[in-house]
Amino acid sequence: MDADFPRLDEHLAGADLDGYLVDADGADSTQRYLSGFDAPDPFTTVYTPETTAILVSALEFGRAKAESRADEVSRLADYDYRSLAAEHGGSVAKARVVSAWLDDLGVASVATPDRFPLGPADRLRERGLAVEPDADDVVTRIRARKRPEEQTHVREAQRANEAAMRAAEALLEEAEVVDADAVATGGDDAGEVLSHDGAILTSERVKTGIETTLLEHGYGLDETIVACGVDAADPHDRGSGPLRPDRPIIVDIFPRSKTSGYHADMTRTFVVGDPDPTVREWFEHTRDALEAALDVIDPGVTGAAVHDAACDVYEDAGLPTLRSDPTTETGFIHSTGHGVGLDVHELPQVAPDGGELRPGHVVTVEPGLYDPAVGGVRIEDLILVTDDGYENLTDYAIDLQV
């Protein structure tokens, strides 16, 4: 993946530093972005305006040369790591190797991510390297604006996401409503539950359908949300147990590509049966809040203004928001959205303190309402900010009843 970092070059020049140093595995988004390489164990990358170089173990050397975006790839063995480790221990040996490697590259001073490991930083300083933590997190801000290739990765992730959502909705659509006693449901509330292929349909079963579909498309996720009833009243409750008719079921899927590392994010709320009038009303208000927020999106508009547009809809309907009541535990109790890319939650923020949106930003817009007495409703689309407005990357219907 080609990259151009004029803002990073300006940052380094302004701080009078030679390079930007990362010590992390490939799951770290800054590491992945700068190196273009994914490895399960930590490795070292340094970016300078002239070159990008990485230092890896012998195990990863061949793959790093073939897959990374680095101009130079070196091995620990090139700097006699084994002998140094036998004499000084692994941590000191690694610092000696990194120090010598940077010296060969002409790098005497570096910025690092603010969360750079403390031990390696101290040991490099002991060897005379100037190490300055980057409190502004410049690389995170740079990668917030997606290049065309990155936009393609997000689009592809969203198509896989939609396939997974269709699999979840199909399970709900095919479900039957059955009576179940407390033993079968695992709780005191017997009543009616959803059944699929003769077995009680649970949150876990729907999650399996989602994850299986994603795997078939080359995507995965650590967790997803299928939350019904009271579970849906907590925005981040993953959901568990039997799914029930006539109650809102929030399905929130945020997959990551196993190849590119890029995410998508989407939420829909479904009801099998007849929604409570309050749930139906909440759904309409939430759809209106989504549309109002989308109407505001334009380059130069702040994420705070987009958030305000969603809050306006809810407050005009007499519903609480954190803007109107910072202590409320019901109503609209989270921000309107966030950036999506190599991290599922990254810059920019669509929130009270959200800054200006720029072309290339990919953000979610996800208003919602929550109350344990009712459940929860959330609708989430994935949006690309363009030169003249926005493009909705989500191609999935917004319907409450299955």
Image (cartoon, grey):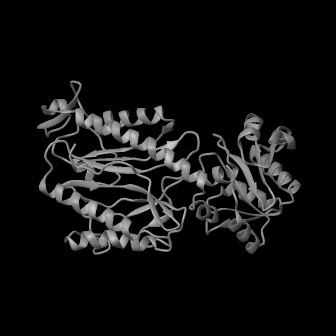
From where the camera sits, is residue 342 visible? no
* Residue 292: quarter of image: bottom left
Where 200 sits versus 374, above or below?
above
* Residue 176: quarter of image: top left
Which residue does the image show at 80% across and 56% down from the upper left? 51
Q: Indicate the position of residue 334 as horizontal and vertical percent values.
A: 35, 63
Direction front: furthest residue: 388
From where the camera sits, is residue 312 visible? yes
Q: Quadrant of the C terminus?
A: top left
Direction top: furthest residue: 198
Which residue does the image show at 23% across and 63% down from the upper left? 285
153 horizontally vs 379: left or right: right
Where 12 sits versus 270, above or below?
below
184 vs 39, nearest the viewer: 39
27 vs 1, nearest the viewer: 1
* Residue 213: quarter of image: top left
328 vs 285, nearest the viewer: 285
Where 202 sits versus 383, above or below?
above
323 vs 117, nearest the viewer: 323
Where 387 sits versus 167, above or below?
below
Q: Indicate the position of residue 116 as horizontal and vertical percent values.
A: 65, 57
All told, the count of numbered labels is 0
Q: Indicate the position of residue 232 as horizontal and vertical percent values.
A: 27, 51
Q: Indicate the position of residue 351 as horizontal and vertical percent values.
A: 41, 68
